[in-house]
Amino acid sequence: MNEEGPIIRFTGVTKVYPLPAGDVVALDHVSLDVMPGEFLAIMGPSGSGKSTLLNLMGCLDTPTSGTLFIKGKDVGTLSDDELTRLRRDHIGFIFQQFNLIPLLNVIENVEFPRILKEREGGCTERCLEVLAAVGLEEELFSHTPAELSGGQQQRVAIARALINDPEILLADEPTGNLDTKTGTGIMELLDEMNRRGRTVIMVTHDQNVAAYARRRITIVDGRIA
Amino acid sequence: MKEVRTAQRIFLVFAVRNLRRHWVRSGLAALGIIIGVLAIASLGILGNNLIILFSGLVADVSDTVVVTPHLAAASGDPFDPRSALATGITERDADRIAHAVGANPSIPLIQTAEALKKGRESGYIPVIVLHASDMPLLLSVAEGSFPPGSGRGVLIGARLAHELDIRAGSRISLAGEDVRVVGVLEERGLAIDINPDYAVVVTHDWYTDLHGAEDYDRVVIKVADLEEIPAVKAAVKDQMNRRKEVVDVQDSREILEMYYQTYDAISIFLLGIGGVALLVSSVSILNVMIISVTQRTQEIGVMRSIGALRREILLMFLYEALILGIAGSLIGGVLSVVAGYAITASVAETIFAGYGTAPTSLDAAGMREILTGIGFGIGTSLLAGVYPAWKAAHLDPIEALRYE
């Protein structure tokens, strides 16, 4: 698969969670291609399998059956370390709960993935660049997450997702915990990231948020409707 | 703003900040380690110092060979109470021993106890019975003189004299007999041949006049040339034990070795107590670490999802355990220097009744005990951190992210 092909390719992917009460089929023979530079919204009711799809795209999980290629790599064959490196170097995560690390300040939170990748870091140019890109005021840089508003935290989280210059941005309800105005600001930021060439894949159940995406798919009962 | 530069460093920073965030919990866990290290190191120092105390006490009689009646059941230790059950050494045997050792003086003696009365004070005190001519060979007089061969005069140990306020020239009642103290002995310290500091030394003539002839309890041989000790021992054994074991022959080095063995056993026992303390404290570290992992489950999920490897999560928690271990162990090490010597001093006072002085400076052996304690402290902390760290590293990132 070359650069021109899909950046993410699901082929007959099934994900089954074995539970004591019986197996739960979260994804049922899903096939899906995501091309580089796409802005994709995944929609669907709760428990439909949206999050499972996003977790698989983020290499946090592997398919029970079928094949999943990310950047040309069959994730089913990768070790835990290889999956982790794929996440670290090529995928940026944005969570509904922001999920900043409370022990680190803004700069450290943003630099953390870069330190993991480059083995060193600090208050680098790259760090200031991404923080400027998300529009965070400089006086907040030494604050800890608890001292920031929801919108500010999500901006820091996006800066963190961008620090290693990933091709893929995965966002799980990125505006779910924000008011409409702040949410709009965040969506405009994601839109801009997409315009700059990144593949953005977003899970949402908000039609207004989904409207930013160029392509929308709906999952129902583990299948693409 | 503090900068975080390297990957190793950032996990160290996580560990430090997390410990600081929960400082009460961290402090209590470290306290456990402090107590454990304190127990191991200070008890080790105590054991060591007891050996030093003892070897110091017996060093000045290294020229001594002690012959005691053989008793199969007894350990050969002259302080073993079972030794008293053995039959005595007869006058004839004492002569044979004297003959065997040639020019080296051999001093037969009886150790017993008699009622002593001085003014209103009375009680039983140890009595050492020596031939008047042998007294200068074993003892030194600080005040007064040695008694003449047939006189009623007695010598009194320095500490007993001090306690009962007895001087040369004082009169005391011993075994109901009125006797005159002709001399006060120089303080001698604890030794393997005789211990006259709390005793009265009487002449053999006086004693046999009172009680009739008795067998001797031991024969002390003073060997002029230390290198002759093995030959002297062989000569005595050869003379006495040719057909059956009649006597036991020991030199101070052997007896010292026996004490070393005893104190080694005590040291190991004390180390065992310290070990249990450390085990308990490592359980507290384990507990704190498991709580820490549980509380930070979501954080671990975030770290894993943005690219932290399993071994990096493992490292972060091992750092926490290591920091607790190092901090606790170092504090414990410092405290054990103080505690170890304080305990030794008090033991020296109570067990050795002030004989000798407790070592007060940190010697190599004491240092070794402290390093052992610190090593054990750090080791057990790290060990206690392994399971929680492993658990953290192997959390499923998705489950961890969802954890509330």
Image (cartoon, coloured by chain):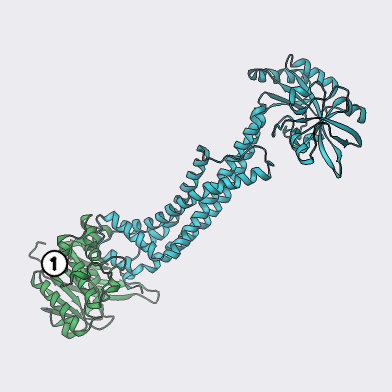
Chain colours: A green, B cyan
Three-letter amino acid code at disc 1? Ile
> From this viewpoint, is residue A225 visible?
no
Which quadrant is home to the C terminus of chain B?
bottom left
Identify whether A114 is placed above or below A22: above
What subunit carries mark 1?
A
Q: Quadrant of residue B125?
A: top right
B176 with respect to B395 (left or right): right
**Residue situated in front as seen by the camera: B21 or B358:** B358
The answer to which quarter of the image holds residue B27 is bottom left
Q: Where is residue A218 in the image (x, y as percent from the top left)?
A: 19, 81
Camera-nearest residue between A197 and A115: A115
Residue at the image position 77 percent from the left and 29 percent from the top: B70
Q: What element carries label 1?
A: loop
Q: Mark 1 — residue? A: A7
Observer able to see residue B74: yes
In which quadrant will I find the N terminus of chain B? bottom left
The residue positioned 55% from the left and 53% from the top of the image is B276
Residue A184 vertical placement versus B160 (above, below)? below
Task: Determine crowd level at label 1: few under 14, some 14-19, many 20+ residues with C-alpha closer than 10 A.
Answer: many
Please state if B93 lies on the left or on the right of A215 as rendered: right
- The picture places residue A28, in percent across and down from the top left corner, at 24, 75
Left or right of A126, for residue B67: right
Q: Which of A165 and A16 is in front in this view?
A: A165
Q: Residue B365: x, y in percent?
A: 52, 38
| Figure label count | 1
The front one of B317 and B371 is B371
What percent of the width, then of the height, locates residue A70? 17, 65
